[in-house]
Structure formats: structure tokens, C-alpha cells
Amino acid sequence: MTQDELSAWFVDQVLPLEGVLERYLRRNWRDGDEIADLRQEVYARVFDGCAQGQPDSAQAFVLSTARNLLIDRARRAQIVDIETFADMDALAPTIDELSPERHLAARSELRLLQRALELLPARCREVVELRKVEGLSQREVAARMGISEDTVEKQVSKGVRALALALQATGLGGAAWAAAQALQRRGRTTQ
Amino acid sequence: MSSELTSIEARAAGWIAERDRAGSAWPAERQAALEAWLNAATAHRVAWLRLDQAWRRADRLRALQAAPSPVSSRPSPRPWWQQQRRAIGGALAGLGLLALVLAVQVVAPLRGNDAQSYATARGQREAVALADGSRLTLNTATKLRTAVTAKQREVWLEQGEAFFDIAHDASRPFVVHAGRQTVTVLGTKFSLLREGERLRVAVLEGRVQVQAEQSRPAVLVRDDTAVAEASNVLVSRQTSQQVNAALSWLQGKLVFDQVSLAEAASQFNRYNRKQLVITDAAAARIGIGGVFDANNAEAFARLLHAGFGLQVQVSEEEIRVSSASAS
């Protein structure tokens, strides 16, 4: 497979599983701060592991990669929580994780994006809305908001990351979304 | 999140924001620098793919424009007629129902109404979500208008090519007008390419009815392609592979299976300002096969030079390709 084909496969087949992967990691790893790094490591391993050919089921491959990573981590850890090893048997993905993800209808995708937008900080949200909802170019956004183009570019780069995070949180379902909102509220009061 | 991942994500998001700012004027040397960074580590690439995908998904937010919040996440307050109805009580339920019917007729066309124009520049692609849940992808140099109301769903393809992923709704057929041709569907996936008054249709899923101005309608099913002209519709069956190859532009690719270099060049020229010019008939007849980046005609020309020994001259306006013997 060429690099481009591999990237296309990764975007079509692997990225939509982010919610499933996230749930699996959260269920099996205590340290919530490490989840993002684990996810990134799983993605890198999956990408490199598929350079030779695509697995039949992206979902089974992603989850078994995640499982092996958690086992590696636990073995490498300096101080091993005895419970970690007790949990190793439970690392098999649950039936809920292995059931095929329902494909999001376009309409719920729109709702998901809209909720993700609501999680962005005010200024960043305004930039993203003008850029994506109104379809203005970055230059036009700068003119409309009366700020410099460099500032718009910075807000977009912030928006890209915040949007990916918010999509992941909203994709996880109500509880995670509420948590993300609470986080955001806390962030607002400390600004 | 570790500081290492934080800095990779910041870098990836920086690239996406910079490219987003440049739009279609993204310089080749910046693209080369981006590719070098992506190739440096898989960790860079997967972080970038994830963020780039999120930013692309956000294109669907266009559907919210002009639509008075088609998918409001807050419950709307109870409309007056329902409050009335409860106040009046069961005795006048029939009257309440009448009020309800009237209200629906008055209110419905306002909800989820989505009348829009979209256009892409040469070499651009854009994803558009409509208020009914349908998704369109516009290919290079394409113009279309949409009108989605409670009663009907219509699109006018003024020029170019688009892929349609239509949400199923038996009560509202989805109609695409292209010049004097109309294409009617209920819920399906297909692509349309308009070349002046000629229309090319390729069906990926479902059923599509094509009606040229003066002919009987033709019904196409999965893997059918058709060429519709003013007075006739020519239908031919393809393999799934051929239909998918015709849709490779959705990934920014051109797939050629033994087409002439002249045809390949005209395909590239749809996507690039810098035009490929094949100067002599001998070169134009060479058969070409393979998968290429639509936006990279220069790389294609370099391959022609390396693979077929053709002469390539690149200037500001065009890329001239000629047989070695032709001077």
C-alpha cells in the first residue's frame, strides 16, 4: 500500500473508532491523564502495523493493538499496582466494544458538530463559525472581527485541536460530554 | 497528555491553520515542508490525520447557514396552538387538531429551509451537508445551488462535478437539474459530471432516474453509468471497480486505466491552473495507467519524462510535453 492509500484507510476505517478506543482505554487504565498518549501510541502502532496490508477488521485490530500496548505498559511500569495484573485477564474487549459501530447519520453528525462547537471558547468559536458556517476565508474573518490575520490563524489552530477533542467527547455520549462542559465552565471562571 | 504529544499536536494544528489560511494559493514549497514533517515520524502523521479529519468534518457546518437551526439541541418552547389546545380541553380537540394542521402547513416550510449557493475554485474540493441530512461533495471548479424545503429537495448543478449521498425520504424526492436534464432519486449515492449540455452519471448505490429533455426517463441501478444529452440517454454497465475509479477524485486522486495521454492531460487540466500541453500526436497516443495526485501535474510530467523519455518543459503558465524526436 502507498502512503496515501494507507492514510485514506486510516481516516476512513480507524479514526471513526476513536470513541470505541477511548472507552476501552478508560475502562482499562487508571491514569486518565495518560489516555491521550495511549491513543496516539495505538494510532502510530496501527498505522505502522498496516503498512504491509489492511486487516480484515479495523476494529478488532485497533482493540488488540490497544490491549497489547496496555500489557506492555504494565510490564514496563516501575511500580506495578497489583490490581493492574489482576485486571489483565479482563482486558479482552467487551461485546459492546466489538459490536460494529453504528454509522452516524448525516443528521446526527451535524448535531454532534454543533455540540462540539458549543464547547469551544467564545473567540475561537466565533472564528470557527465564521470560517465553517458562513464559509468566509481567514482574511474575511479577520476583516469581519477586526483582528489581524495572524490572530485568526492562531485561533484556527486552537480551534482545530479543540474541535477534535470536542468531537471525541461528544462522540462518547452524554456523560463524557457533560464532563467536558464542566471542564470548560471551570476553564471559563479561571480565565 | 505528555508534553511531547502536546507539541506534536500544536505543530500539526499549526500546519492545518496555515494551509487553511492560504486556501488555493498554498505554495509548493510549504507543501513539501509539510510532507517532510509528516514523513519524519508516524507519530506526526497520525496526529495530523486526526486533526485534519476533524477540521474537514467541520465543513458540514455549512448546512447551519440560512437554516434556522435545523437541529436545535434545545427543545423549542411549546407552540401557542398546543398551549391553547390544552387550555380548551378535550371538548374542542377536533378544533385543536385543525389548528395543528394549519400551523404545520404554515410553520414547516420555515424549518430546515436551506437555499444556498456553493462554488469551488480550480483544484478545490468541498463537503456540504444539507438540512435534510444529505451530503454533497463538490469537485474542482464546480457551481451549484440547493433548495431544501419541507415539500421538496432540489439542486441545480450549474457547472462541474459533484458526488451525492442522499438521505432517504420517500415523501420528498430529491431532484437535480443540470441544464435540460433532470435526475430524480429517493435515497442513494451517485455522482454527476456536467460538461456543457452533456451529463455523465455514475451510480454507486440505489436507483436513479435520468430524464433528458425529449426522451423517456431511464432508470439506473448500482454500477450503471450513463451519458445524457439533449435527446438521448446512453446507459452502460460497469464493474464496481470502474465506478469507484471514476469517484477517485473524492480522495483527490486520478485513476487511469489505459487511457491516452491526451485524455489523462485533459483530466489533470480540470484540477490545475498550470495546464498540461501535449504537443504532438505520437505523445498524445501513449497509453497511461496508474493512480496520481490530481493536484500534482508536475510530478506526473516528471514520471512521463522518466518512464517514457518524453521532453518536459515547465513554464509559469503550462507544462509542455513532447516526444523526444519532435523538436
Image (tube, coloured by chain):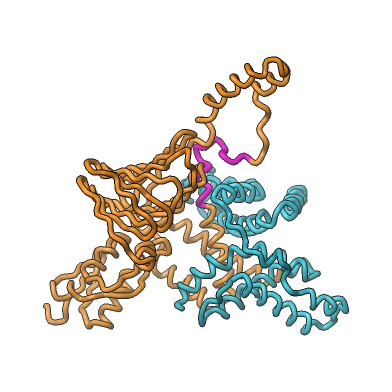
Chain colours: A cyan, B orange
| Residue B284 percent location from the top left of the image | 18, 72
Query: Does the magenta-highlighted stretch encompass residue B65?
Result: yes
Which residue is rendered at x = 25% and y = 80% of the image?
B305
Which residue is rendered at x = 49% and y = 74% of the image?
A6
Reply above or below: B278 against B61: below
Reply above or below: A119 against B70: below
Looking at the picture, tell me which residue is in the foreground, B1 or B163: B163
Which residue is rendered at x = 41% and y = 70% of the image?
B29
Horizontally, is B16 left or right of A25 in the view? Answer: left
Reply above or below: B30 against B61: below
Horizontally, is A186 left or right of B218 in the view? Answer: right
Query: Does the magenta-highlighted stretch encompass residue A93?
Result: no
| Residue B105 percent location from the top left of the image | 52, 25
Looking at the picture, tell me which residue is in the foreground, A10 or B304: A10
Looking at the picture, tell me which residue is in the foreground, B315 or B199: B199
| Residue B135 percent location from the top left of the image | 47, 50
Q: Quadrant of residue B234?
A: bottom left
Q: Quadrant of residue B236?
A: bottom left
Determine if residue A187 is in view: no
Give the number of marks. 0
The stretch of residues the image draws in magenta is B59-72
Reply above or below: B194 against A82: above
Determine if residue A78 is in view: yes
| Residue B295 percent location from the top left of the image | 36, 65
